[in-house]
Amino acid sequence: MNEEELLELYGLEPDDIHREPIRELLKQEIENRKSEDNEVLKLLCIMLFCIGNVEDTQLIWRAKRKNQDTGSYIDVQLLCGAGYERTLFYLENMDGGRHMRSCFTLNSASRMILLIFPKWNGSQTMNNITVFDICAHWKESYYAKFA
């Protein structure tokens, strides 16, 4: 499925009832080592971000860490679809608050969020930018691309 088909089927801000099929498509994209185009991977992450379920942070982090290209291509703010504070709380309290097994886990995602967002977008902070603002940005970008 390509970007245009995904947008037609689910829209950029899909209903929560589409969350599981989107998650499954994202898992397939993560496992697809032959894929050189990361546009579908990124769009699926954006869709999950817009749904805003904190548990999707783990899957979006896996997508971001798929390879070196996706590490740069998948924006870190896509980890915070449930909101900044809620996402940090979730990441820092996973596994009953136990430390994560390695530095290459979701614990590093929470550190990345803490380092980047206070300085995000020049003088703005994450507290001034809402999930709605980010979804609106992506909506404008994607619909301009396929208009």
Image: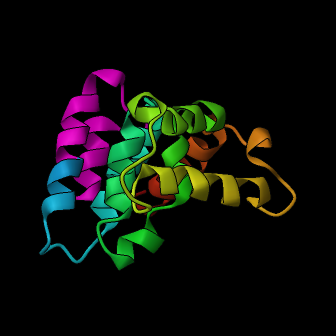
Specify the quadrant of the image occupied by residue 31: bottom left
Instruction: Tell whether 81 sits left or right of 84.
Output: left
4 to 96, vertically: above or below: below
Magenta highlight: main SS: helix
Image position, residue 37 (x, y; %): 26, 73
Q: Residue at x 45, y 44 (%)?
A: 99
Q: Residue at x 19, y 50 (%)?
A: 27
- One can see residue 12 in this view: no
Residue pushed farthest top? Answer: 17
Specify the quadrant of the image occupied by residue 105: bottom left
Q: Tally the marks.
A: 0
Instruction: Tell whether 138 sits left or right of 94.
Output: right
Range of magenta residues: 1-25
- One can see residue 19 in this view: yes
Query: Is 3 a magenta residue?
Result: yes
Image position, residue 58 (x, y; %): 37, 44
